[in-house]
Image: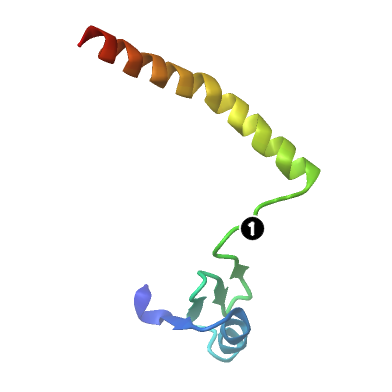
Amino acid sequence: MLSSTAIVNDLDSAISLSQKFPDFRFVTLDGDLAEGTGLIESGSPVADESLFGKRQLLQEIRKEIPIKQNELNGISQKNFRV
């Protein structure tokens, strides 16, 4: 699998080379990927600063609160017994 993977400086180079050498996959230093099939994947996600993105993040955090509270309670009980 890695024998057909090359590391390149930037996404433009990766796209250009993937068109010339479709049997290879090209990965940038930032983790972006370009394949000869036309597939392009971003390596580092950008934070979604839209209202929808912030709302989704808030919902995920709210789901984590009870889980983290239980973990904290468990730690507190262990420390209290000692």
The residue drawn where x is 59% and y is 65% is: 42
Q: Residue furthest bottom?
A: 20
Examine the image and state in which quarter residue 34 appears.
bottom right
**Where residue 59 sits: x, y (%)?**
66, 30
The residue drawn where x is 60% and y is 76% is: 37
With respect to residue 40, does 22 lie above or below? below
Total numbered badges shown on the rendered structure: 1
Examine the image and state in which quarter residue 12 appears.
bottom right
Given residues 73 and 43, the one toward you in this image is: 73
In the picture provided, is 15 more to the left or to the right than 55?
A: left
Examine the image and state in which quarter residue 60 appears.
top right
Judging from the image, what secondary structure is the residue with disc 1 in?
loop
Q: The C terminus lies in which quarter of the figure?
A: top left
In the picture provided, is 67 more to the left or to the right than 77?
A: right
Q: The N terminus lies in which quarter of the figure?
A: bottom left
With respect to residue 14, does 47 lie above or below? above
Given residues 23 and 10, the one toward you in this image is: 10
Q: Residue furthest top?
A: 81
**Where residue 20 sits: x, y (%)?**
58, 91
Q: Which residue is mark 1?
A: 46
Give, as a three-letter code, the residue at label 1: Val
**Where residue 25 sits: x, y (%)?**
49, 78
Q: Residue furthest right?
A: 51
**Where residue 55 sits: x, y (%)?**
73, 36
The residue drawn where x is 27% and y is 15% is: 79
Mark 1, Cα crowd under 10 Å, few <14 / some 14-19 / many 20+, is few
Given residues 68 and 60, the one toward you in this image is: 68
Given residues 74 and 12, the one toward you in this image is: 74
The residue drawn where x is 50% and y is 69% is: 31
